[in-house]
Amino acid sequence: MLFSYIKLLRPHQWIKNIILFAGIIFGKKLGDLESVERAIYAFFLFSLTASCQYVLNDFLDRKEDALHPEKKHRPLASGAISPTIALLLTAILLSVTLVFSFKLQADFFYWVAGYLIFNIVYSRFLKHMVILDVMSISFGFVVRAIAGSIVVGVSFSSWLLLCTFMLALYWGFGKRRGELIILEEGAKGHRKILEEYSVNFLDLMMGIVATMTLVTYVMYVTSTHTIENLGTDKMVYTIPIVVYAIFRSLYIIYIKNMGHNPTKAILTDWGVLVAGFLWLLLVVWIMYSGSGQSLPFQL
């Protein structure tokens, strides 16, 4: 039973909230232990809030999820947990999380609350609107990035926010494509919005947003504003790693057919994991090697 409750909160999805740490990385605050602690605190608070939202989504979608080959094993769809008990426990957890979010920082609380409200609107309306359903999910990643920056007191580049939005769109359309393929004729029965999509249309969308993701990242690392803020023009050397990661993810979606579960695809693919680690290592080294700032660890 305990495992079912943990599974209900989907802790494996917390990887999406790692973007909250972008603020301390690109704001060059990795050497500020107070900022690091606040970012970690914010990560867990945002993750718990997102988990509460997942429970609400599972409650609303439990009948449709029961028709899905993988989602039918979710606690609410399978009947392992009573919907009433799930909602009661979620309400308690959410209340505690929101209180601590406000205690951490008022502005952070407003973004967390806004994220929650937006996702409720998404669950009720936007998820049933073609294209807007995927754009809404992508907007959630932008909110995460902004919230993570606010809590450590740094500004976030518009180019980087746009790159985040495009990358989320890319995986979002990839998920829709994967769902169409894995569910085949049963796709419409699981998620009505899928009848508005086709594989060819999603291939076109993915081609566009994959290109836009690369373009916006290149614009970010080469912009004069970024060079001035970071104090270096060497971020351009991270571009090949990003290009590889995008191409590798295309391989995951089109060859390995894992687009329907982006989180699992990322966590289980060595190519993406290694690329992500090397990118982070290179970014930190470039930004801090000549800055004179100390880090809580040695590179």
Image (cartoon, rainbow, N blue to C red):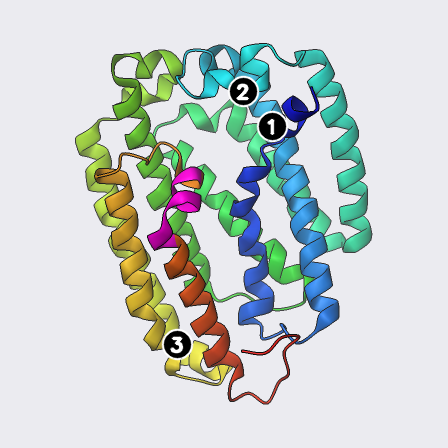
Give, as a three-letter code, the residue at label 3: Met
Give, as a three-letter code, the residue at label 2: Arg
**Label 2 environment density (alpha carbons within 10 Å; few <14, some 14–19, many ≥20):** some
Considering the numbered disc 3 on the image, is that residue within a helix, a strand or a loop? helix
Labelled pair 1, 2 in contact (Cβ < 8 Å): yes
Q: Is residue 34 visible in this depiction of the protein?
A: yes
**Magenta residue span:** 264-272
Task: Check disc 2 and report the residue beneath it.
Answer: 74
Can you tell which mark lies on residue 235? 3
Task: Check disc 1 and report the residue beneath it.
Answer: 7
The image quadrant that residue 90 belongs to is top right
**Label 3 environment density (alpha carbons within 10 Å; few <14, some 14–19, many ≥20):** many
Q: Nearer the viewer, residue 267 or 243?
A: 267
Give, as a three-letter code, the residue at label 1: Lys
Q: Is residue 222 visible in this depiction of the protein?
A: no
Frontmost of labels 2 and 3 is 2
Which residue shows up at 46% across the image and 38% down it?
136
Task: Please identify the residue farthest to the left as the structure is shown.
Answer: 200
Which residue shows up at 62% across the image and 72% down it?
30
Frontmost of labels 1 and 3 is 1
